[in-house]
Amino acid sequence: ATTIEVRDLTIEYQTGSGSVHALGPVDLDIAAGEFVSIVGPSGCGKSTLLKAAAGLISPTRGSVSIGGKPVQGPQSDLGIVFQNPLLMDWRSVMSNILLQAEMRRLPKAEAAEKARTLLAQVGLAGFEQHRPYELSGGMQQRVGICRALVHDPPLIMMDEPFGALDALTREQMCYDLQDLWMTRRPTVLFITHSISEAVLLSDRVIVMSARPGRILEEFRMERPRPRL
Ligand code: ADP
Ligand code: ADP
């Protein structure tokens, strides 16, 4: 079961001019299959919390565990999406996605099939052999989302994944994410600036406050959820 347990998590970044208190202490429990959104002003520590939960940065104090095991380094059962997908421009769209699948030891034929299905779902059928630099920012972002989902991860973390998309695509992606969550029930940690997106998609919305990087309040959503 892919639960996430955050205990007393504090992150301070070391910079040239001293240390920046970016987060915490924060305590947070996410149940297996739960969809949790995090909202809050810029700089309140949302990305820092997500990166620490993903094992990409280590806590100054406190701990994170996933499925009962302490998080140390990148997690193999995690699909992660950032604001900028950082695709490899010298590789095709398909190759960017398949590289991820290969690292997860997914059989190649199965991965290519899955990649094609995902690309079609996000409106990119026919772009398999294009290079990322031939695509718009929003299209690249959608490739990044396909790459994160190709191995059917039981745990998904997304940091403002739809920020670069036009309103219509954004709405469509929301519904796709909702469908995915309803059919496969991954555990999802989702950062967004859109309250309506958070309310539409989540079991729980967590509001963070700018100073000093703490959880201010959380709201549990009632079902059935409103459509956007
Ligand atoms: P949010 O995602 O809510 O915008 P972040 O987690 O990115 O917030 O940042 C939280 C705080 O930590 C901010 O004050 C930001 O300037 C600072 N910060 C983030 N990353 C670094 C870093 N690598 N080095 C120093 N300070 C950082
Ligand atoms: P590049 O984009 O750097 O030229 P390749 O096209 O050689 O990379 O693809 C990298 C890997 O992805 C190779 O192992 C290749 O077999 C595989 N691959 C690329 N496109 C497809 C595809 N459409 N279907 C299945 N596998 C593919």
Image (cartoon, rainbow, N blue to C red):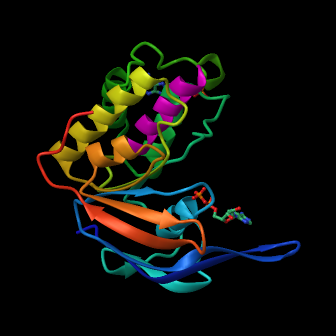
Quarter of the C terminus within the rendering: top left
**Residue 175: image location, x then y, percent:** 27, 33
- In the image, the segment drawn in magenta is 136-149
Is residue 186 found left or right of 18 in the rendered image? left
Q: Which of these two is toward me, 127 or 218?
A: 218
Quarter of the N terminus within the rendering: bottom left
Task: Say which residue appears at 41% left-offset and 23% top-offset.
Answer: 169
**Residue 11: image location, x then y, percent:** 61, 77
| Residue at the top extreme, as displayed | 126
- Residue 54 appears in the figure: no
| Residue at the left extreme, as displayed | 224
Is residue 32 found left or right of 56 in the rendered image? left
Quarter of the image where one finds residue 216: bottom left
- The answer to whether residue 137 is magenta is yes
Please tell me whether residue 155 is drawn above or below residue 210 in the rendered image.
above
Please tell me whether residue 224 is drawn above or below residue 221 in the rendered image.
above
- The answer to whether residue 26 is magenta is no
